[in-house]
Image (cartoon, grey):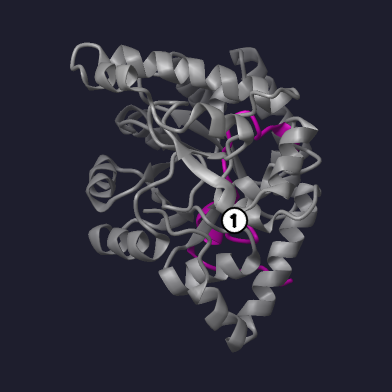
Amino acid sequence: MENVKNGLTELLGIDFPLIVAPMFLVSNTAMTIAALQSGVTACIPALNWRTDDAMRQAITAIRQKAKGPFGINLIVNRSNIHYKRQLATCADLGVDYIITSLGSPKEVIDVCKPLGIKVFCDVVNADYARKVENLGCDALIAVNKEAGGHAGPLMSKELIPQLKEACKLPVISAGGVGNGAGIWARIHGDGALGVSMGSPFIATTEAPVSEEYKQACVDYGAKDIVLTTKISGSPCTVINTPYVQKIGTQQNAFERVLSKNKRLKKYVKMLTYSKGMKSVEKAAFSATYKTVWCAGPSIEYTKSIESVSTIIERLKKEYKEVNENPTLQQAALTSSLVQRD
């Protein structure tokens, strides 16, 4: 298809307004290279590399094998003890952009802007969007109610107009999109410049996770996604496997009391995060009855395990079909995967 020209494609120099979203444990070098070769961009969580050397080698390998911009996702709160080193590496190697999550992006912006590195910030409401705009970020990642991982409280149709009214920054929608119609609706209906999409890329040949995790994304759907506070202390979306049903999705009474204690809550959250991430990592790479698989409702569109390039080409084709058909456009504008209370 012809390149889709809009603000995001021009901002990043890509052919199609799509970011293959950063996913903890899932995103890797192979997925990023495939995305770049398909004319889109991709972002990898810095936490997916255990060492600085591994991170540097991966960034170098991507540049050697594919042309196009790619980004790094930084967790910028105290739970990420490697944040300072990761930021320094991004600055040293001059990555194209950084997506910040779960904290203040001030230091990232101060370091990266003079180097020409763009900074995009995850936001879930207009108040925080104004703060990061004042700090000088380049774009907003609008994390909505249908997002995988740490979802926001508002639907895309509510969130994006609020952000556009509050700020002058470009808005990129994150959550609930798994086909070309969804991308079209976010851009032409909600007013986003593009889409950040993650969960539909879990079940790909390039993803490093277990076949069981990939197959779960095929077998389960939007109705099987639940929010749990047991992983990081904050609401996070997971597949509602029998194990998740057994352990429940809410912190127990003791954990809730500790989480509200002003002196202890910081340490409790760090401990919860560390313990939760270890359980997620074990489940992601091995077959175990303790299956805690992170995913969003957009796995509804995952019907088989495919390559990254196959998925992207299908998204482009679907987008083109909707763009040329008013009937499909109307259906796209009214579609929604989930309405959580």
Of 240 and 8, which appears nearest the observer? 240
Q: What residue range appears in magenta?
A: 1-30
Of 225 and 22, which appears nearest the observer? 225
Where's residue 87, x and y in %? 46, 23
Specify the quadrant of the image occupied by residue 229: top left
Residue at the bottom extreme of this rendering: 326
Of 302 and 226, which appears nearest the observer? 226
Q: Is residue 159 above or below residue 321?
A: above
Q: Does the magenta stretch include residue 24?
A: yes
Q: State which quarter of the image contains the N terminus.
A: bottom right
Of 34 and 111, which appears nearest the observer? 34
Kind of residue at disc 1: Leu
Helix, strand or loop at mark 1: strand
Where's residue 281, x and y in %? 62, 22
Specify the quadrant of the image occupied by residue 290: top right
The residue that appears at 50% across and 43% down in the rendered structure is 226
Which residue is identified by label 1? 18
Q: Main secondary structure of the magenta part?
A: loop
Where's residue 26, x and y in %? 66, 33
Q: Is residue 53 above or below residue 202?
A: above
Where's residue 163, x and y in %? 30, 58
Q: Does the magenta stretch include residue 290?
A: no
The residue that appears at 78% across and 52% down in the rendered structure is 309
The residue that appears at 51% across and 26% down in the rendered structure is 247
Q: Is residue 195 above or below residue 1?
A: above
Q: Is any part of residue 117 visible from this angle? A: no
Horizontal side, residue 321 vs residue 113: left or right: right
For disc 1, the neighbor class at 10 Å (few under 14, some 14 to 19, many from 20) is many
Q: How many marks do you count on the picture? A: 1
